[in-house]
Amino acid sequence: MAQEITPAIKQFIEKVKQHFQDDPKLMEMFEQTFINTYKTTIRPQADGTTFVITGDIPAMWLRDSAAQVRPYLLLAEQDQSIAKMIKGVIQKQFFFINHDPYANAFNETANGMRYHNDQTEMTDWIWERKYEIDSLCYPIQLAYLYWKATGDTTHFDDSFVEAVSNILHVWRTEQNHQQSNYYFVRDNCPEQDTLSNAGYGAPVGYTGMTWSGFRPSDDACQYGYLIPANMFAVVSLRQLTEIAKSILHDSVIAEEASQLAMEIESGIKQYGIVNHPIHGEIYAYETDGLGNYVMMDDANVPSLLSMPYLGYCSFDDPIYLNTRRFILSEDNPFYFEGKVAKGIGSPHTPDQYIWHISLAIQGLTAIHEEEKQYITELFKQTDAGLNLMHEGFHVDDPAQFTRPWFSWANSMFSEFVLSRIGLIVAGSPLHTLADNKGGRVCE
């Protein structure tokens, strides 16, 4: 059942639209994308938690659900119904993590529905059990940002403490993946939907980073150390350290999170940087710690392009700038340029398809106004007249697309538009929430 749009949301939309009175197309696109998640994907539960479907699939992804509701944090302090909704999402996410920290997507009830009959340790709550580092980062980020937006700390309860203990245990375990019991096999599927090596993934050496089975696209990692996901883990662990010190007063969690962040960061610096013959020192997308690398970037976040957006580095970090030039060039095998558009796609979608999510990240990490304006115009030209964002679309013909609307992409577009008028500072997600309260979202 569709959620009724609150007066605060209506007022906020009108406030934003006043900045674009000479651009009716952009006004309409913002209104439709900003309300899309609230109207179509929110499922309040009897226990006070909030279930968020991903859109065209009746399951809740830990990653997507956090990104879907994140723009509404700007209204959480003034609208108690929105605050309750977001807090409910956080509580539902940590309930799921405590159920199984290796699963990426869950059912609304323990109904046994699932995407596929996979060979892994399934339960009736689990829709899919693809282990992805970012599935554990996003809930920490959302819990942190909700605190910064509202001042509310009641969500840092026993369930939260149990969940972060589970997260720390998983990330520690997966520093030495050969000790892990996690496996995933899917029969009769494309190669990117299952793990090699009898479901345990390609062999890896110890690096200090933590292993991931799958990318934020839900595609299998070629090599287990997914660099952008490890970067996100570093940021999340630093946020967790602050929570543990300031709110939980738990020195054990604070020390463990801080130490793990340092170990992963050291691994990124030692094993994640390569010398490209054209672009100089850049970050690889994946490595195995044994000398093999995947040199690319993917549209899904965390991505290499999103590093400053996530708060991992500054906009003018030299290695990031080198990496960004590589990513936004034909040297990246998933950068496509056509008659209408150019940008980053994914092996998850067809060849020559680029993603609205990656365009939003490009705009949010752009330094120059010309690039931001280019991205703004590109959005307006590639919605196929629907005023909503797709997953991917063809660079020559935006009328060819995957998904008529994609909730995560709609939320990312909303963040980009809000950044254009200063309501969100391009950089860390909803960076100004913390700045307004005397702190910083990401150090």
Image (cartoon, rainbow, N blue to C red):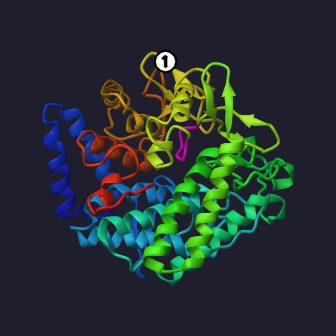
Q: In the rendered view of the protein, which quadrant contains the C terminus? A: bottom left
Residue 200 is covered by the magenta coloring: no
Q: Is residue 275 above or below residue 37?
A: above
Sort mark 1 into few (<14), some (14-19) or many (20+) by Cα contacts within 10 Å: few
**Residue wearing tag 1:** 338
Q: Position of residue 9 (x, y in %)?
A: 22, 58
Q: Give residue 171's position: percent from left, percent from top.
A: 68, 63
Kind of residue sitting beneath label 1: Gly
- The image quarter in which residue 163 lies: bottom right
Looking at the image, residue 128 lies above or below residue 333? below
- Which residue is at the front of the view, 49 or 110? 49
Residue in the foreground of this view, choosing between 113 and 427: 427
Please identify the quadrant where the N terminus is shown. bottom left
* Closest to the observer, 265 or 123: 265
- Who's the residue at 32% across and 24% down the image? 370
Give the residues in magenta: 298-303
- Residue at (46% x, 71% y) in the render: 243
Q: Is residue 9 left or right of residue 88?
A: left
- Helix, strand or loop under label 1: loop
Asked if residue 60 can be seen in this view, the reply is: no
Assess whether residue 300 is covered by the magenta stretch: yes
Whether residue 443 appears in this view of the structure is: yes
Q: Is residue 187 left or right of residue 269?
A: right
SS assignment for the magenta stretch, majority = loop
Q: Which quadrant would residue 77 be assigned to in this image?
A: bottom left
Q: Which residue occupies 47% across, 29% down?
A: 400
**Residue at 54%, 76% in the rendered image:** 95
x and y percentages locating residue 2 in the rendered image = 32, 62
Total label count? 1
